[in-house]
Image (spheres, rainbow, N blue to C red):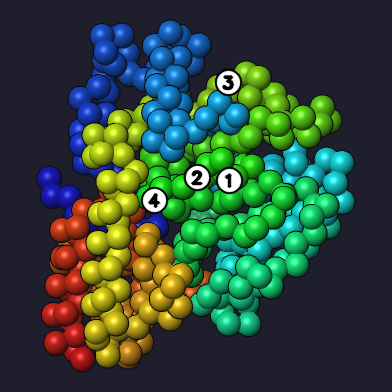
């Protein structure tokens, strides 16, 4: 067996220790005589896994009891629609900040439910920066303000939040658990699992309980946040195996020292890679240095005709999935929590040697 360094943006690398534990427990989970995949979601065994995942996530992010933690399905893309479907009830408009490809997708879905007020956009700068928050035109009567604080494709990240009385709804799919956040500043946080949480198939939604009154009875039952909260994410069969893996990832993260400890490593990883890119005339990253993502690092080669050779040689060197998103091309290294510093160092060594050979 030989595992490689996997730079995929998602589904992304999982900690090896988690995969090994899942492997060891695969045939017989804790003496149950069956795997987690084969047990009733209403069994005491699975209920204990769900409770554990929820408790660990609450500890890792210091989530207080004003919030409900939901384990949903359909990917973050479903939440693009499910959120306006629940939260715009009784409101005419919803505010959205436009910082790139994932903001655009969220806006497109929201328009099916409400008037969308785009409060600021950096489209004209090709999404290489974030709008100045002092210039945002936020309609304080809107249902909420939606943000995507880490644009996975563009490689743009911001941590400050605009000043508003509106509930802030944030798509943290590609940054959750990578850095400290103050959950109490948000109305809703949602994140697909397949980057920093676990395998695809489960979406985390952390919602302030006072917002649940907005969910109308006319919504499909499985889209109704109030119903899902009342049933502890068990309105129907939840994605049991994905929740189990998420619990193992949360356990691993706690053993690493939690979010603060992993954030310190993430800062070092990103710094090393950006420093190298900036020091080279062969590679470039277009993002305003104040807003460069710690999780997704896109870069281009001075000579784009070398891209396919770069990908072929990097793959052969055990560095997997460095191609940029199909919509933008170039390269992208996604370096989520499970990517060790050694993986980033191996990438930099490869980039340096490639530049020497072809630069
Ligand atoms: N939002 C962001 C920021 C993402 O990176 C992604 C997936 N890469 C999505 C939403 C969509 O997630 P899914 O494919 O799980 O619907």
Confirm or deny contact between disc 1 and disc 3 (CB under 8 A). no
Residue hosting label 2:
182
Question: Which residue, given by chain and number where applicable, does mark 3 sit on?
Answer: 232
Q: Specify whether tag 4 is near ligand 1 (CB below 8 Å).
A: no
Question: Which labelled disc corresponds to residue 332?
Answer: none
Q: Mark 1 points at which residue?
A: 185
Q: In which quarter of the image is residue 120?
A: bottom right
Side of 130 relative to 315 (left or right):
right
Q: Between disc 3 and disc 2, whose residue precedes?
A: 2
Crowding at label 1, few (<14), some or many (≥20) Cα neighbours within 10 Å?
A: few
Alpha-carbon span between mark 1 and mark 3: 23 Å
Where's residue 227, x and y in %? Answer: 70, 24
Say whether disc 4 or disc 3 marks the residue closer to the N-terminus: 4
As helix, strand or loop, the secondary structure at mark 2 comes to loop
Q: In this view, does 337 lie to the left or right of 137?
A: left
Viewport quadrant of the N terminus: top left
Q: Which residue is drawn at 19% across and 72% down?
A: 348
The residues tagged by marks 4 and 3 sit, at their Cα atoms, a distance apart of 27 Å
How far is mark 1 from mark 2, CA to CA?
6 Å
């Amino acid at each position: 067996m030989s595992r490689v360094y996997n730079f995929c943006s998602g589904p992304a690398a999982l900690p090896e220790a988690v995969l090994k534990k899942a492997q060891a427990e695969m045939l017989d989970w804790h003496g149950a005589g069956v795997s987690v995949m084969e047990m009733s979601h209403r069994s005491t065994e699975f209920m204990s896994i769900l409770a554990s995942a929820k408790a660990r996530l609450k500890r890792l992010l210091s989530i207080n009891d004003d919030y409900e933690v939901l384990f949903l399905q359909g990917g973050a893309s479903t939440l693009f629609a499910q959120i306006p479907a629940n939260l715009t009830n009784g409101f005419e408009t919803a505010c959205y900040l436009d910082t790139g490809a994932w903001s655009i997708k969220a806006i497109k879905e929201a328009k099916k439910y409400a008037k969308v007020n785009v409060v600021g956009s950096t489209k004209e700068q090709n999404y290489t920066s974030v709008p100045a928050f002092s210039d945002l035109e936020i309609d304080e009567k809107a249902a909420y303000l939606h943000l995507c604080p880490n644009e996975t494709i563009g490689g743009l990240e911001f941590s400050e939040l605009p000043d508003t009385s509106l509930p802030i709804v944030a798509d943290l799919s590609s940054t959750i658990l990578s850095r400290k956040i103050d959950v109490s500043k948000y109305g809703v946080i949602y994140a697909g699992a397949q980057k920093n949480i676990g395998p695809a198939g489960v979406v985390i939604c952390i919602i302030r309980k006072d917002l649940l009154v907005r969910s109308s009875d006319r919504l499909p039952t499985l889209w109704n946040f109030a119903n899902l909260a009342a049933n502890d994410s068990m309105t129907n069969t939840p994605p049991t195996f994905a929740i189990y893996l998420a619990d193992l990832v949360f356990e691993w993260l706690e053993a690493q020292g939690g979010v603060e400890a992993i954030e310190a490593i993430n800062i070092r990883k990103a710094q090393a890679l950006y420093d190298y890119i900036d020091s080279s005339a062969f590679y470039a990253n277009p993002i305003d240095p104040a807003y460069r993502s710690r999780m997704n690092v896109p870069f281009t080669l001075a000579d784009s005709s070398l891209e396919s050779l770069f990908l072929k040689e990097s793959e052969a060197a055990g560095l997997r999935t460095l191609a940029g998103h199909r919509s933008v091309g170039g390269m992208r290294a996604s370096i989520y929590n499970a990517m060790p510093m050694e993986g980033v160092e191996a990438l930099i060594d490869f980039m340096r040697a490639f530049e020497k050979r072809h630069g």
